[in-house]
Amino acid sequence: MIDSVYKVHSVNVSSLNADELLELYTGYSSSVEKYNLQKQFRDIDEYKNLYLSAFSDGNELFIINEDSLLCGILSFVKSADWAGVERYNLTIYLSISIISENLKKCLNKFITEKLKQHSQIAIITYNDELKQLIDAHSSKVQLRANVYTLDKNDVDIDLLNSSIEKYQAQNSNLRMTYTDIISEG
């Protein structure tokens, strides 16, 4: 059995042709479906104009391929925290279900290179699928975030509200609320 070879490629957003744009949008759509996220962009034009237009001035977009198959999209963006301190966030969206050791090695190499450039970064992944990889960099990662999506019917609103009250009582500068305004579609 031949081991898969994964490679990370930088995307020059300003010079994308129609096929490359379609490939990115398809990768985005696959990630939305895989992680059960709310679809933010209705079509390829919205994706290009609202999402891809943000990749300039230090913001970078990368794709990860296995041969010619798109396996994921990596966004590396500069942002500021609430105190105005500049931070770098790496968000990893994988469009494949099986996370092989070779894929983890490729992502590890990419993260290591970004840490050499910027001594600390925030890494955002979904559903804890890369927990071991992130833990390997825990001394250099300033923020780890795992984003989970829940079926609305699985949420115990009473338990959630009581937990919110408890956390707010312990942390006077923290404000949390449960909201039911996100559409189902």
Image (cartoon, rainbow, N blue to C red):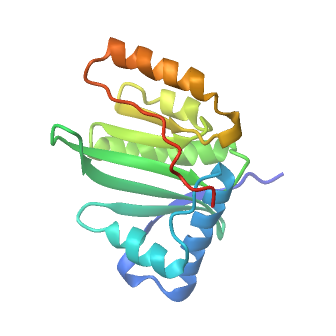
Which residue appears farthest toward the right when viewing the image?
A: 1
Image side of residue 25 versus residue 172, left or right:
right
From the viewer's side, name the closer residue of 37 and 58. 37
Q: Which percent across, then down, holds residue 69?
A: 67, 67
Image vertical order of residue 48 relative to residue 176, above or below: below
Query: At 49% from the left edge and 28% from the top edge, which residue is drawn?
Result: 136
Image vertical order of residue 165 relative to residue 90, above or below: above
Query: At 45% from the left edge and 49% from the top edge, which residue is drawn?
Result: 91
Image side of residue 169 versus residue 38, left or right:
left
From the viewer's side, name the closer residue of 35 and 159. 159
Which residue appears farthest toward the left when viewing the image?
A: 84
Q: Which percent across, then down, holds residue 141?
A: 37, 32
Query: At 70% from the left edge and 39% from the top edge, which residue is drawn?
Result: 153
Q: Which percent across, then down, holds residue 67?
A: 66, 66
Quadrant of residue 154 in the image?
top right
Q: Visible in this render: residue 13?
A: yes
Q: Visible in this render: residue 12?
A: no
From the viewer's side, name the closer residue of 111 and 151. 151
Image vertical order of residue 30 relative to residue 98, above or below: below
Query: At 53% from the left edge and 79% from the top edge, which residue is drawn?
Result: 44
